[in-house]
Amino acid sequence: MGLSFWERLSIITGLLVLAALFGLMFFVANIEIKDLDLWLHIGTGRWIVNNGFQIPQTDVLSCTITGKPWINHEWLFQVIVYWLFNKWGAEGILNAQSILISVTAFILLILGYNKDKQLATIFPLVLVAIVYFGRFTNRPDLFSLFFFAFYIFLLSFFLNQRWTIYAMFICQVLWNNMHGFFFFGPLFVLIGLSAEWIKRHVPLPYEWNKIGCLTNQEYKNLKLIFLFVFLACFINPYTFRGAWYPIRVFFELSGQSRIFFQNIVELQKPITWGNIFSFEKYPYYKLLIMISALSFFFNRDKLDIGNLMFWLVFLGFSLAAIRNMIFFAFAAYLAFVTNALTLSMRDLLPLKVIDKKFIHVTSIVVKLCILGWLIQYGTSISLNGYYDFDKYDWKSEFGGISQRQYPVKAADFFVENNVRANLMNGFNTGAYLVGRCSPNIKVYIDGRTEVYGPEFFSTYKNLWENGDPKLLQETIDKYDIDAIFIHTIERQAPDQFLKSVHALKDFVPVYLDFDGIIYLKDMPKHQEVIKKYRLDFENWDPQRLDIFRMGYRRVIPYRSINRAYTLETLGYPDAALLEIEETLKMSPTYIEPYKLRGKIFAERKEYMKAFEDFRIAVMMNPHDYKMRMNLALSYYHMEKYEYAAEHYEKIMTKWPNRPETYFKLSRTYIYLDKYNKALDVLSKGLELAPKAALDTITLADMMAERGHDQEALKAYQLIKGVKGKKNAMLHYKLGSVFKRLGDKIKAKQSLEQALNMDPENQMIQNCLRNLMEEK
């Protein structure tokens, strides 16, 4: 077999890999709808269409910021997705998404494909695809990615054509009204202009002044394109304000707006000092950084300065937030394939003579490995899914709408009962409720962080996490809240907030299910719904599923356990136990019911029952710190101190940086009369938590109460940094110990110090007086 055979076989193998890659991308693009913000876009699109295509200039969706100026730069995308959803449902949106993603990827392929260097295209394109998978989220970002690729396509192949100017103008107008990243359009052109100006006017090293230079006509066209796309930015419903929007947001990234970056995952940084050298997080993104950077290094003699500027801009952009990684992935791919055009194997390998047949055979093997990996990856993810408890059937993660991501049942309740209300809700449910329940429901907050602002978000976060009753009532009064929805679809509701809401006398619970709990204000407009659905938690009847119909399929009964957690938090443990019983019927190997039931039994001081459940939970997951601690605590409460100490010691070895373990182990040692060991672990615990004075005082008090004043004295003396009345009490306790040990001088000094810090304390005064009388 001659050289031409291996060359053709290599090309065919590469085409098979590309076909598999595009097939996989098209399949993954059909992933079920699970994005939260999509519903905000659908709800807004519906409002725009129903109001004669009037674009809102102020907020129309919430009950908290009604009338606040709103730059809705995504209105065109919202109209499109509403039309698709209204006409074809979820499948309409998913099919459109699959087509858009495939076209975008095909443009990237055209930009980088070289049949003589297929691997230089295939390998980075596979990495891009994997990063891309994380953004298949039915959002306007997908259009920005399409325009990103299409702009580079036009600038790369048709810059010398006059019609390109008008085509890019039209694209820019569309981009302006679809997504806030429309500023990339002028930025691309500006980078090109800057690079060309530098090449023409600044002496550069190597051959940089000659690489990628434009003709005079292309340079002239690029200037006109910049003018046209810049002016096109003002063609939006908000004119100058709309064009200035992304710049304004950029300058607001610091200061108070940092709260968004700290609390919203996609806005956090992908690379930190903690993970910079680890490939556990975002390995394909990091690999793209490495290979694209290396391509510049190996191509340093013939480097295109414009290519480098483009790469640096998007590297910096991606390092700012996780959501921006895919834009760098596109830029890294384009940078890599551009550099690969002027590189050969001889530039990369330290070999003077490389046999061409060897190169082709090696290329075939590598491509077959990539093909095998793509097939394996596609096969594995095609099996992803979960049990649909409504249909008693398996639901694939591809196609349709997610049944586990949204509060579907709660939204159904609002819609079916025609509830009209100003609704207090959590951040992660606002967008969905807008899409499902607007305009009847006006939400407290949704995903438009830039509209609500950092101050409002900070107040919301404080209320939601801390549940301050006073702040809750002030919020209800300020915004005329007459309904509250606390979601539990993704995680359990904050305990204190849920308890504070439940304590409101004029709000009635009318709905409780796996996705949350709804309260309606006891007022005339809600009377019919309250009368029909008022919940009686004392006589709770759990939802029972047909386990005969479920059969032997292994399921995760998250619905019943979610209800159980909510009921337990509300203070109805008996109702929670009924839901736990149903959970265990469906899946006796599910860990959550044992964890919750153990907690309930522990609170009831039924420690043997709690021990049995915590023991099972630890057997199922020995790496659960909290359950290991609960198991040890069960031993402690049953006065099996040897076992408790043994388990605390094991926990301390496995999690050496948890101060709580040291304090609890110290307490256990005291009950075992092992005071030196108690002091030793107490000292280590204080090294981890120097401010844990109250825990230390408690342990020292235990030693003193058991007649071990010397050890108690050492424990008290470990405490540092206590101020105010706490410090006065510490010196009082020290004085009392010195007094019992017969050291009246130190006792007097300590008591006097205590009295100086808290002169009105009668107990300290009496103790000092008694000491003086003993003299």
Image: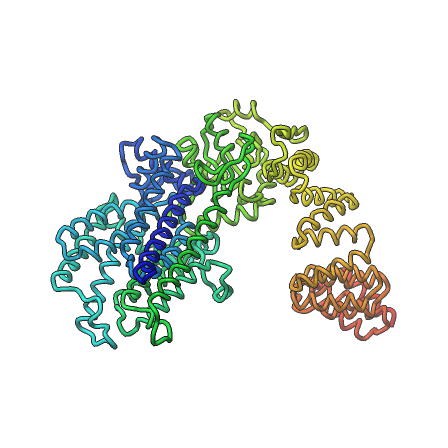
Assign the N terminus to one quadrant of the image. bottom left
Q: In this view, does 11 lie to the left or right of 641?
A: left
Which residue is rendered at x = 33% and y = 65% of the image?
312
Q: Is residue 256 left or right of residue 274?
A: left
Assign the C terminus to one quadrant of the image. bottom right
Q: How many labels does the image show?
A: 0
Q: Is residue 615 left or right of residue 460?
A: right
**Of residues 143 and 360, the one drawn nearer to the viewer in this rendering:** 360
Q: Please identify the residue farthest to the front as the structure is shown.
A: 1
Which residue is rendered at x = 39% and y = 61% of the image?
288
Residue 597 spot, x, y in % from top left:
70, 42
Please, is residue 395 above or below residue 459 in the view? above
The answer to whether residue 592 is seen in the rendering is: yes
Which residue is rendered at x = 45% and y = 62% of the image?
271
Residue 187 spot, x, y in % from top left:
26, 58
The answer to whether residue 333 is seen in the rendering is: no
Please, is residue 62 above or below residue 226 in the view? above
Quadrant for residue 760, please give it.
bottom right
Quadrant for residue 648, please give it.
bottom right
**Of residues 262 and 97, the one drawn nearer to the viewer in this rendering:** 97
**Of residues 419 and 53, the one drawn nearer to the viewer in this rendering:** 53
Residue 259 spot, x, y in % from top left:
46, 55
Please, is residue 684 above or below residue 635 in the view? below
**Of residues 59 and 586, the one drawn nearer to the viewer in this rendering:** 586
Residue 526 spot, x, y in % from top left:
51, 26
The scheme the figure's colours follow is: rainbow
